[in-house]
Image: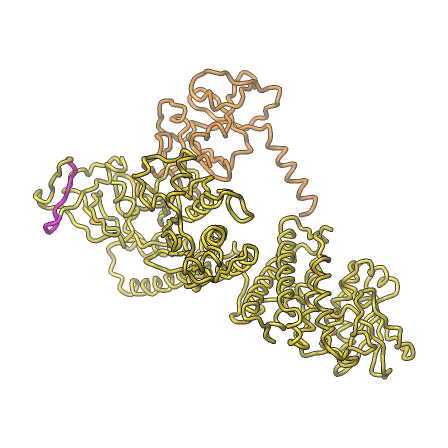
Chain colours: A orange, B yellow
């Protein structure tokens, strides 16, 4: 591997860190680190699978690969909403596995500096325990999701 | 010393080939050691293996490996000449060659892991040279002339001085291109190329491959080749000309100075060989094409093999899978509904036959016979016998049974653990066995069979067997008993040894006793979907049984609809399907479970829409379809909305993300993508019937 290649990919990684994709669940604004995200797709046909927790909507066919999808609203114990043309599936990767997150709508990619981040509140409403930090950009408050915490209960221990 | 970057692409080939050769070496050694004799074929084979490894490792600049291979090669060179000399060193020879083989294997592994081979083989080389000296010492006459040698890099003392200065000896000085690097290796490669074309071949410096510092000498003074051509000198010159990286070559005419001018390099042990003879080049032997990397294909030539990158095989399998799905899509296209297309369907059947065959062949590509694994166990048994001072014979059956490569790789370690356990704990010492009336030589048997879609592998020994008392008391002491001791069946007691940390061994030996073995073994077996069970008779022996299902990636299924979902039911599980006409057929048992009467027999009725919580309008038994399924000797009926049609599907396992939820236990064995892109869940009759 030539040194040029290494330089480019390192640059690419630098580009990703500190950058977050923001999305809406209801009126709340959330962020996920770009590092974890593979792609964003619009809502598509989901095959339900019995025997899974209620927030798993089922499986989707992602270009020949079978990927499970989770409804973030349901995971946050909020009321389920019907999907519309703005609903999206954010496909994230965790521990070399892929999973899709169904969200109300996706906003944009923002850069959040370390000093803009604050510690999330101890208690709080839905999803508080899944947060890594809270940031303020302009007049918006972004709740940053910690992927490891988010999926902690879903993954096997070994 | 890290690898020269220009060599990196060859590294993988080097590792693969060297490993293959070393495995073959072990096989030959074991066989020969048993028969206490080295056949001419085997000697040649070993010589060739060492020669190849020497050459290719020299090119990769792994000098430790190369010099050790060289030393072994020397020994076998002597044996090739006179196999009777084996008797003077017999057992010691096998020991040191085995040790060398291990060293080489370890070094190759080190190369694989870190790219470097840094161990020092001098101890083994010294031993090999000692044995070589003993073997040579036996020969009364130290033949001066006509001691055959192959390529120039064979004998350590390559003292050559001409007894005859004839004009058919040529001296050619070769200069390599500036900056081409590794001049010493290139010089060696050149010698190898010329080897076949010459009756006699020598060079200054005489062992360029052994010493990288010679590069500067070669650059400065050129590389001098002295040869007597086999047929025409022109052939040799042409070969030199065609050689890469050679800038110039010149024929040097110094007939007088032949004697004494060609003296050996520093490599010691100048024994009887160095009696001033020209060493004629023996052309008959297999030339060292070790310099050409990839051409050292399967040496034994029992089958002609091609080594293929595994990812290519995986790709091929994926494509075949998609081909099957797409074929189904074409043949059952909704566009064709209701049309009478006899010729079309005839061709479609032909197509189906071909894809079936293609599928079978591709699946078989990934299959490897278990014999490879069994061979490795031979080595382990031999080594442990020596170390533990026990006598054990290993018997293998069914080595030709084939399993998927992933399974073969996964059960290697479990095998080793179990064999080690058998030898360490199971088989008694010879005296003990004699006292018990058993043959002094213990027996360990490995057998493999293909039974009904499963591979059944048994490892059994005729040793002590498991002591249920000792096991129970150990479990008791560790506080891991979950019920009163009396309630434990023998089988359950035996299974105790698979719990982590369980070992009744008092001391930890090199091989076992840390209590880490059996639970890791079971985990590895379960990882490939297998099961491990243990049976034993005290005083008589223990048997481990591994059962691994053969995963068939493509299944003939019947698509059935339940609510908005589609499920695939393997055709092999279906006995029959029918609609319910009369109410009489349905009865209820004492629990209120629905049962259905069929020809005087009662079967439970499983409503899939209830089992899978699917929303459907078809809840009345008269509206849907009932399918009678079976697995083993269990039979039941399932109720679904409708049958959608037969389809060949490619089984995809559920995403590992969902591993926690054990969908298998619910009766779902996997999923598949249908021709229209939708996902269908595959039912497994066995688990379905168990779950209900």
**Residue B148 in the image: above or below residue A67:** below
Locate residue A158 relative to residue B613 in the image: left or right: right
Q: How many marks?
A: 0
Residue A59 coordinates in the image, percent (x, y): 38, 39
Nearer to me, A75 or B689: B689
Q: Quadrant of the C terminus of chain B?
A: top left
Residue B217 locus on image (x, y percent): 86, 62
Decide which of B43, B421 is in the foreground and name it: B421
Which secondary structure dominates the residues rendered in magenta?
strand
Quarter-of-image position of residue B342: bottom left
| Residue in the picture at 11% in, 51% down | B599
- The question of residue B417 being in magenta is answered with no
Q: Is residue B553 visible?
A: no
Q: Nearer the viewer, residue B198 or A125?
A: B198
Q: Is residue B439 visible?
A: yes
Q: Which of the pair B215/B6 is nearer the observer?
A: B215
Horizontal and vertical percent for residue B398?
41, 63
Q: Is residue B375 left or right of residue B335?
A: right
The residue located at (21%, 41%) in the rendering is B606
The span picked out in magenta is: B592-601
Q: Is residue B599 magenta?
A: yes
Determine the residue located farthest toward the front in the rendered image. Answer: B435
Q: In this picture, is B581 found above or below B198?
A: above
Quarter of the image where one finds residue A111: top right
Q: Is residue B446 left or right of residue B643?
A: right
């Amino acid at each position: 591997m030539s040194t040029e290649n290494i330089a480019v990919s390192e640059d690419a990684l630098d580009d990703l860190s500190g950058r977050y994709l923001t999305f809406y669940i209801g009126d709340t604004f959330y962020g996920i680190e770009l590092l974890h995200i593979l792609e964003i797709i619009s809502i598509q046909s989901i095959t339900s699978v019995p025997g899974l927790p209620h927030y798993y909507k089922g499986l989707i066919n992602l270009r020949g690969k079978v990927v499970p999808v989770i409804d973030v609203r349901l995971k946050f114990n909020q009321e389920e909403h019907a999907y519309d043309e703005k609903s999206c599936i954010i496909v994230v990767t965790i521990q070399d596995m892929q999973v899709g997150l169904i969200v109300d709508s996706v906003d944009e990619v923002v850069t959040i500096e370390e000093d803009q981040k604050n510690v999330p509140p101890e208690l709080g409403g839905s999803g508080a325990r899944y947060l890594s930090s809270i940031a303020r950009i302009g007049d918006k408050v972004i709740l940053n999701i910690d992927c490891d915490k988010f999926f902690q209960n879903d993954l096997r221990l070994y | 010393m890290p690898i020269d970057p220009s060599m990196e692409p060859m590294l993988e080939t080097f590792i693969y080939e060297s490993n293959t050769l070393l495995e073959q070496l072990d096989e030959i050694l074991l066989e020969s050691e048993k028969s206490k004799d080295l056949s001419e074929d085997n000697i040649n084979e070993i010589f060739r293996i060492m020669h190849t490894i020497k050459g290719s490792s020299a090119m990769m600049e792994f000098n430790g490996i190369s010099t050790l291979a060289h030393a072994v090669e020397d020994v076998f060179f002597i044996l090739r000449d006179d196999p009777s000399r084996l008797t003077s060193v017999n057992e010691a020879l096998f020991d040191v060659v085995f040790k060398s083989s291990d060293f080489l294997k370890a070094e190759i592994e080190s190369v694989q892991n870190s790219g470097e081979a840094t161990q020092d083989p001098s101890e083994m080389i010294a031993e090999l040279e000692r044995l070589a000296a003993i073997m040579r010492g036996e020969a009364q006459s130290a033949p001066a002339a006509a001691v055959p040698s192959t390529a120039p890099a064979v004998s350590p003392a390559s003292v050559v001085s001409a007894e005859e200065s004839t004009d058919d000896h040529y001296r050619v000085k070769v200069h390599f291109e500036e900056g081409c690097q590794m001049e010493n290796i290139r010089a060696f490669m050149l010698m190898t190329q010329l080897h076949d074309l010459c009756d006699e071949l020598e060079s200054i410096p005489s062992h360029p491959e052994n010493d990288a510092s010679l590069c500067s000498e070669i650059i400065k003074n050129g590389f001098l080749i002295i040869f007597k051509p086999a047929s025409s000198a022109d052939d040799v010159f042409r070969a030199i000309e065609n050689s890469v990286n050679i800038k110039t070559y010149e024929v040097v005419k110094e007939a007088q100075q032949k004697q004494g001018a060609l003296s050996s390099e520093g490599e010691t042990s100048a024994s009887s060989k160095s009696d001033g003879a020209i060493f004629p080049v023996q052309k008959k032997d297999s030339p060292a094409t070790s310099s050409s990397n990839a051409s050292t294909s399967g040496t034994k030539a029992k089958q002609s093999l091609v080594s293929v990158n595994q990812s290519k095989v995986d790709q091929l399998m994926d494509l075949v899978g998609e081909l099957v799905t797409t074929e189904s899509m074409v043949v059952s296209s909704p566009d064709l509904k209701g049309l009478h297309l006899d010729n079309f369907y005839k061709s479609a059947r032909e197509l189906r036959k071909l894809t079936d065959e293609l599928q079978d062949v591709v699946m078989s590509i990934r299959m490897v016979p278990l014999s490879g694994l069994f061979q490795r166990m031979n080595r382990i048994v031999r080594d442990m016998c020596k170390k533990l001072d026990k006598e054990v014979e290993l018997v293998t059956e069914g080595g030709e049974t084939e399993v998927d490569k992933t399974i073969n790789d996964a059960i290697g370690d479990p095998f080793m653990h179990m064999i080690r356990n058998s030898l360490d704990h199971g088989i008694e010492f010879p005296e003990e066995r004699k006292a018990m009336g058993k043959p002094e030589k213990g027996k360990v048997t490995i057998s493999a069979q293909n039974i009904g879609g499963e591979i059944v592998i048994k490892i059994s020994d005729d040793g002590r067997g498991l002591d249920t008392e000792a096991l129970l008391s150990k479990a008791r002491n560790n506080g891991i008993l979950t019920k009163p001791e009396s309630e434990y069946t023998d089988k359950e007691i035996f299974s105790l040894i698979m719990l982590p940390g369980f070992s009744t061994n008092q001391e930890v030996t090199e091989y076992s006793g840390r209590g880490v073995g059996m639970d890791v073994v079971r985990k590895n077996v379960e990882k490939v979907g297998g099961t491990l069970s243990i049976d034993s008779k005290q005083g008589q022996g223990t048997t481990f049984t591994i059962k691994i299902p053969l995963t068939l990636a493509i299944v003939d299924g019947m698509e059935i609809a339940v609510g908005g979902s589609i499920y695939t039911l393997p055709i092999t599980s279906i006995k029959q399907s029918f609609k319910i006409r009369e109410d009489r057929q349905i009865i209820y048992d004492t629990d209120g479970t629905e049962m259905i009467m069929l020809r005087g027999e009662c079967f439970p009725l499983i409503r899939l829409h209830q089992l899978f919580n699917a929303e459907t309008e078809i809840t009345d038994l008269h509206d849907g379809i009932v399918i009678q399924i079976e697995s083993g000797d269990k039979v039941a009926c399932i109720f679904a909305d409708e049958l959608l049609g037969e389809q060949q599907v490619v089984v995809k396992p559920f995403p590992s993300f969902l591993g926690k939820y054990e969908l298998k236990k619910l009766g779902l064995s996997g999923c598949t993508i249908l021709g229209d892109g939708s996902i269908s869940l595959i039912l497994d009759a066995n688990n379905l019937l168990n779950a209900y």
